[in-house]
Image (spheres, helix red, strand yellow):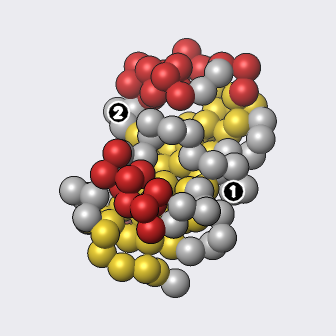
Amino acid sequence: MATLFISLTACADHEHTIAYSELPAQAQSFMQQHFNAADIAYIEKERDGLHYEFTVYLKNATKIDFDQSGNFESIDGEIYPVPEGIIPDIIANYLKQHHPNHFAVKYAIGRRTIEVELGNGLELLFNLDGKFLRLDD
């Protein structure tokens, strides 16, 4: 048991750069829908325990995360807005109504909540159905 734990721990930080063609099909489809392939700087595949995660880095420093199956998990544009169509309409409409002068720079889907960070640093939490829960620090 200890040997298994040590070997999994040793592999936890294992990451390497991969080609676009090595991304799961679902992640490739997401990227084609929302981004131009020429905007991709590099892609990392990282082992996290028994699973892999994929991170696509764009030339403008935007970071997009996918799980092992290629399901979208998060996007962090740092200072750049999250492209239209990534944030569900119910949340996008809430942002337009309540924060019309600010745009989302980060969108992350968690196990129980969705986090949206605005360009002014304000963080909003929504449930998985898109209902606003609270402001977060």
State the residue in front, 14 or 100: 100
Res. 47 visible in picture: no
Q: Residue at x 70, y 36 (%)?
A: 58
Q: Amino acid at mark 2?
A: Ser
Disc 1, SS: loop
Res. 43 visible in picture: yes
Q: Residue at x 47, y 57 (%)?
A: 96
Quadrant of residue 5 within the rendered picture: bottom left
- Badge 2 crowding class, 10 Å Cα cut-off, few under 14, some 14 to 19, many 20 or more, is some
State the residue in front, 50 or 87: 87
- Furthest residue toward bottom: 137
Above or below for 117 versus 37: below
Disc 2, SS: loop
Above or below for 89 versus 18: below
Quadrant of residue 130 within the rendered picture: bottom left
Question: Disc 2 designates what residue?
Answer: 69
Tell me, for residue 78, which label it has, or none: 1
State the residue in front, 72 or 18: 72
Q: Amino acid at mark 1?
A: Glu
Above or below for 100 versus 121: above
Q: CA distance from mark 2 to mark 1?
A: 25 Å
Q: Residue at x 61, y 62 (%)?
A: 101
**Considering only order in the chain, which callout, 1 or 2, is on the residue closer to the N terminus?**
2
